[in-house]
Image: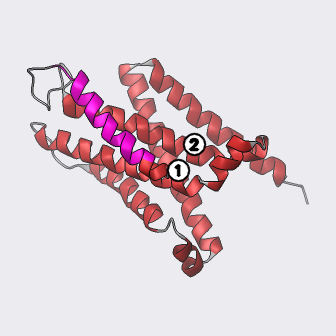
């Protein structure tokens, strides 16, 4: 199952990060970057890959009907759960890192980030047929559409901030991928449901 693959990859990220982290320094070191900071970063990369594929599955299916896009569409819920698994691993890494950071205090930005995880929990707990039946398909779709768009916005803001403050081609690629995925979905929706003048 895809979410089990996400769990395995999340575990692999821990092993690889521990291996590549500089020896003889604190796990919470920021300069040079220690294990916890590297784990936080790499786990975010993994989570984003699952998110952007889950977000783009229906769009890719509309643009090109083939075995791959059909597979992604059939397993879109699993992709979402894979994202949740990877992102909760990221939360674990981030929490451990921040707990070791001298002078860290909860502030407004922490509360904003916390809302993103509240939304993620809501999506995770309702990613099942029971929730579809009890919420109703319309309410369920609205929740998951709003939720995944909020999560994409979170990643867009986070990656854009990192790109502008620290640089890095990978973050430019991620920002471009988000813009492309959102633009393609909006364009497709408008082409399927054109706005007509009265």
From the viewer's side, name the closer residue of 162 and 25: 25
Whether residue 60 is visible here, answered yes or no, is no
Q: For the residue labelled by badge 2, is the local secondary structure a helix, a strand or a loop?
A: helix
> Is residue 15 a member of the stretch shown in magenta?
yes
N-terminal of the two: label 2 or label 1? 2
Q: Which residue is mark 2?
A: 53
x 26%, y 33%: residue:
15
Q: Residue at x 9, y 28 (%)?
A: 26
Task: Sort mark 1 into few (<14), some (14-19) or many (20+) by Cα contacts within 10 Å.
Answer: many
In terms of secondary structure, where does tag 1 sit? helix
The kind of secondary structure the magenta stretch mainly shows is: helix
* Spatial separation of the CA atoms under disc 2 and disc 1: 7 Å
Residue 173 lies, with reference to residue 66, above or below; the image says above
Q: Position of residue 76 (x, y in %)?
A: 59, 53
Give the residue drawn at x 44%, y 62%: 124
Q: Position of residue 183 (x, y in %)?
A: 67, 39
- Give percent across and percent down for residue 82: 46, 50
Q: Position of residue 189 (x, y in %)?
A: 75, 50
Q: Would residue 116 be found to the left or right of residue 79 on screen? A: left
Tell me, for residue 79, which label it has, or none: 1
Q: Is residue 137 magenta?
A: no
Picture quadrant where residue 43 is located: top left
Most foreground residue, 176 or 7: 7
**Residues at marks 2 and 1 touching, judged by CB atoms closer than 8 Å:** yes
Q: Is residue 35 left or right of residue 124?
A: left
Q: Residue furthest right?
A: 198
Q: Is residue 160 left or right of residue 10?
A: right
> Which circle marks residue 169 in the picture?
none
Which residue is at a point 42% across and 37% down the rendered structure image?
Answer: 46
Which span is picked out in magenta? Answer: 5-22
Task: Judge the density around disc 2: few (<14), some (14-19), many (≥20) Cα neighbours within 10 Å.
Answer: some
Q: Is residue 161 visible?
A: yes
């Amino acid at each position: 199952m895809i979410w089990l693959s996400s769990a395995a990859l999340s575990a692999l990220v821990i092993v690889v990060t521990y291996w590549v982290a500089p020896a003889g320094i604190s796990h919470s070191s920021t300069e040079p970057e220690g294990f916890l900071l590297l784990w936080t970063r790499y786990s975010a990369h993994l989570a984003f890959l699952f998110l952007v594929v889950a977000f783009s599955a229906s769009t890719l299916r509309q643009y090109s009907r083939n075995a791959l896009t059909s597979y992604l569409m059939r397993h879109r819920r699993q992709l979402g759960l894979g994202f949740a698994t990877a992102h909760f691993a990221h939360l674990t890494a981030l929490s451990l890192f921040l707990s070791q950071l001298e002078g860290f205090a909860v502030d407004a930005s922490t509360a904003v980030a916390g809302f993103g995880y509240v939304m993620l929990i809501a999506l995770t707990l309702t990613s099942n047929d029971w929730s579809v039946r009890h919420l109703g398909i319309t309410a369920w779709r609205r929740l998951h559409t709003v939720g995944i768009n909020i999560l994409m916005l979170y990643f867009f803001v986070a990656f854009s901030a990192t790109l502008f403050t620290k640089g890095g081609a990978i973050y430019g690629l991620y920002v471009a991928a988000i813009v492309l995925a959102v633009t393609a979905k909006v364009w497709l929706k408008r082409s399927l449901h054109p706005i007509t003048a009265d």
